Image (cartoon, helix red, strand yellow):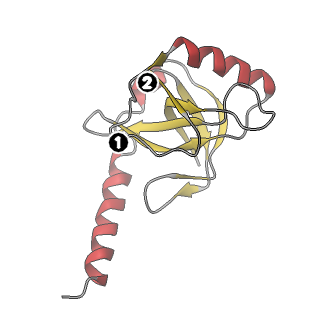
């Protein structure tokens, strides 16, 4: 599967990796809020790491763009949500996160706006399934 996601930040690199550890990405929901869907840390060439790094620094801000600030495994830095990336992944987790996300390329700036609402139906269906499953397991 492939999805266009909006970059909302990055984490500090670990070990010998230059520039950043992972991109923190999201998808705009039907209410126009950016919903966090995961960390993208693999799939980058050294040249892509440098190119993305330059764009991230130009967009740096102190305010997280996500509706709910995600917990990260490393220090997070935030950006204005205008950079879009193509992400390949194997599916969605039960909590609406990308499973095995891999960077597949940068997208045109207009793609950040184009992602609005794309995930909405799937998110609603997931929420409904989760609610039904929770109701089925609840004992009165």
Q: Looking at the rendering, which quadrant does residue 137 occupy?
A: bottom left
Give the side of residue 118 with respect to residue 52, left or right: left
Q: Where is mark 1, residue-wise? A: 68
User: Looking at the picture, how far across and down is residue 63, in whole percent?
Assistant: 38, 24
Q: Position of residue 112 (x, y in %)?
A: 45, 25
Determine the image quadrant of residue 140.
bottom left
Near mark 1 (Cα within 10 A), the count class, few <14, some 14-19 or many ≥20, is few
Instruction: Please say if 133 is above or below 57.
Output: below
Q: Secondary structure at mark 2?
A: loop
Towards the viewer: 38 or 112: 38
Q: Residue at x 57, y 19 (%)?
A: 56
Residue of label 2: 81
Q: Which one is earlier in the sequence, the residue at label 2 or at label 1?
A: 1
Q: Residues within 10 Å of mark 2 (few under 14, many from 20)?
A: many
Q: Which one is nearer the viewer's eye here, 63 or 67?
A: 63
Residue 115, label in figure? none
């Amino acid at each position: 599967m492939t999805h266009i996601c909006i970059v909302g930040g990055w984490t500090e690199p670990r070990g010998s990796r230059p520039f950043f550890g992972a991109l923190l990405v999201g998808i705009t929901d039907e209410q126009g809020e950016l919903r966090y869907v995961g960390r993208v840390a693999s799939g980058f060439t050294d040249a892509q790491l440098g190119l993305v790094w330059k764009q991230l620094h130009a967009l740096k801000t102190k305010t997280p763009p996500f509706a709910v600030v995600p917990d990260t495994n490393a220090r997070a830095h935030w950006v204005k949500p205008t950079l879009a990336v193509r992400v390949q992944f194997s599916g969605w987790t039960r909590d609406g996160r990308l499973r095995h996300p891999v960077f597949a390329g940068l997208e045109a700036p207009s793609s950040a706006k184009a992602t609005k609402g794309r995930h909405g139906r799937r998110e609603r269906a997931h929420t409904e399934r989760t609610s039904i499953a929770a109701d089925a397991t609840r004992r009165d």
